[in-house]
Amino acid sequence: MSGFIDLKQAQSYGDRARSDYRAEVLGEISDATALKIVTQDVQLAESYILEKRQPQAWENADNLYRALVTPKSWPGTDVPMSNLSMPVVLEGVEKIMPVIFSALFSDKTPFLLTPTEKPLRKSRALRPRSSAGHQSLRV
């Protein structure tokens, strides 16, 4: 089974990304070049999504969640069949959501983040501040 990096498009993309990154670091990138990079990235992402048939998988998952029943009729007649749905997936997700939310966000302020750089710099990296009773988040 081959991965994304083995694709010819991915290898050419990696070379282009490195050269564009160097240009960006040196400050030599124009608006037209940036637009071209973004457009190519979007096209690459769209083609990947369509090749993997992800929209169909998303539709199937959504139909399972909503318990969508397609209208059908009895064979050889125009008499419609019953369209009663059973939202089993929806009920399961709704039942487990409060447990997950309370586990992740149990404190009054679940995550404390403080900047590590001066605000005028390019990088606005955040680092967690460990405090008693609060969860730390690594960014």
Image (cartoon, rainbow, N blue to C red):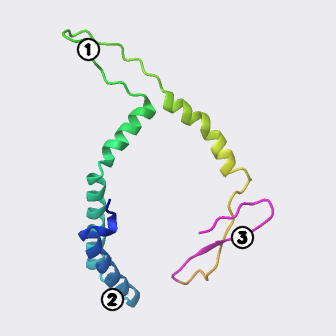
Q: Nearer the viewer, residue 27 or 5?
A: 5
Question: Quarter-wise, where is residue 33 in the image?
Answer: bottom left
Packing grade of label 3 (10 A; few <14, some 14-19, many >=20) is: some
Mark number displayed over residue 28? 2
Q: Is residue 127 magenta?
A: yes
Residue 4 is left or right of residue 93, and the answer is left
Q: For mark 3, give the secondary structure.
A: loop
Question: Quarter-wise, where is residue 91 in the image?
Answer: top right
Q: Nearer the viewer, residue 10 or 35?
A: 10
Quarter of the figure with the N terminus: bottom left
Identify the residue under disc 3.
129
Identify the residue under disc 1.
73
Packing grade of label 2 (10 A; few <14, some 14-19, many >=20) is: few
Question: Furthest-right residue in view?
Answer: 132
Please name the amino acid that badge 1 sits on.
Ser
Q: For mark 2, give the secondary structure.
A: loop
Identity of the residue drawn at 36% across and 37% down? 60
Quarter of the figure with the C terminus: bottom right
Tell me where the magenta segment starts and ends, as one range: 122-139
Q: Main secondary structure of the magenta part?
A: loop
Label 3 – label 1 distance at C-alpha: 62 Å
Task: Indicate which label's residue lies in the foreground, 2 or 1.
Answer: 1
Question: Furthest-front residue in view?
Answer: 1
Considering only order in the chain, which callout, 1 or 3, is on the residue closer to the N terminus? 1
Residue 88 is left or right of residue 61, and the answer is right
Count of all numbered marks drawn on residues in the image: 3
Q: For mark 1, give the secondary structure.
A: loop
Please name the amino acid that badge 2 sits on.
Glu
